[in-house]
Image (cartoon, helix red, strand yellow):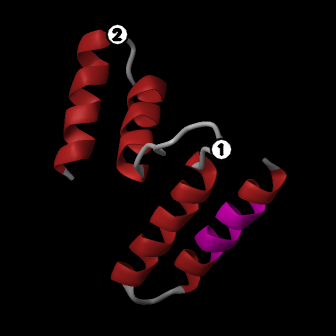
Amino acid sequence: MQKRLVTAAEWVGKARRDADRAKAFVQVVFALEALLQIQDRKMPVQPSVTYRLTETAAYIRGTDLTSRTQIASDINEI
């Protein structure tokens, strides 16, 4: 977990310094991916970053099933 946090912090630092907003956005996505990595060798198929981000954000921000469903839908649309 410590390595993932350091990697994510490095990507966020790069994003903050980058003047190109598109590149900075991609770097932030890399940071999120570093945080949301699942390293279970027993799982034959790893969930996508989009799925993990959607599920995590909906769980953290949502207060009930309806709000979590809406948040997940909004993130998928983005």
- Spot the residue most to the bottom: 19
Q: Please tell me which residue is depicted at 47% across the width and 34% down the height of the picture.
A: 56
**Residue indicated by mark 1:** 41
Secondary-structure class at tag 1: loop
Answer with mark 2 or mark 1, whichever residue precedes in sequence: 1
Measured as percent of width and height from the top left, residue 31 is found at: 57, 62
Residue 10 counted in the magenta span: yes
Tell me the mark number nearer the camera, choosing from 2 and 1.
Answer: 1
Residue 53 is situated, as x and y percent measured from the top left of the image, at 42, 43
Q: Are marks 2 and 1 in contact (CB under 8 Å)?
A: no
| Residue type at numbered disc 1 | Arg
Q: Magenta residues, as a range?
A: 6-13
Q: Secondary structure at mark 2?
A: loop
Residues 54 and 37: in front is 37
Question: Is 73 situated left or right of 58 in this image?
Answer: left
Instruction: Check if residue 22 falls in the magenta segment.
Output: no
Q: Residues within 10 Å of mark 1 (few under 14, many from 20)?
A: few
Q: Quadrant of residue 61?
A: top left
* Residue situated furthest left in the rendering: 77
Q: Which mark is residue 64?
A: 2
* Location of residue 57 by image quarter: top left
Predominant secondary structure, magenta span: helix
| Kind of residue sitting beneath label 2 | Asp
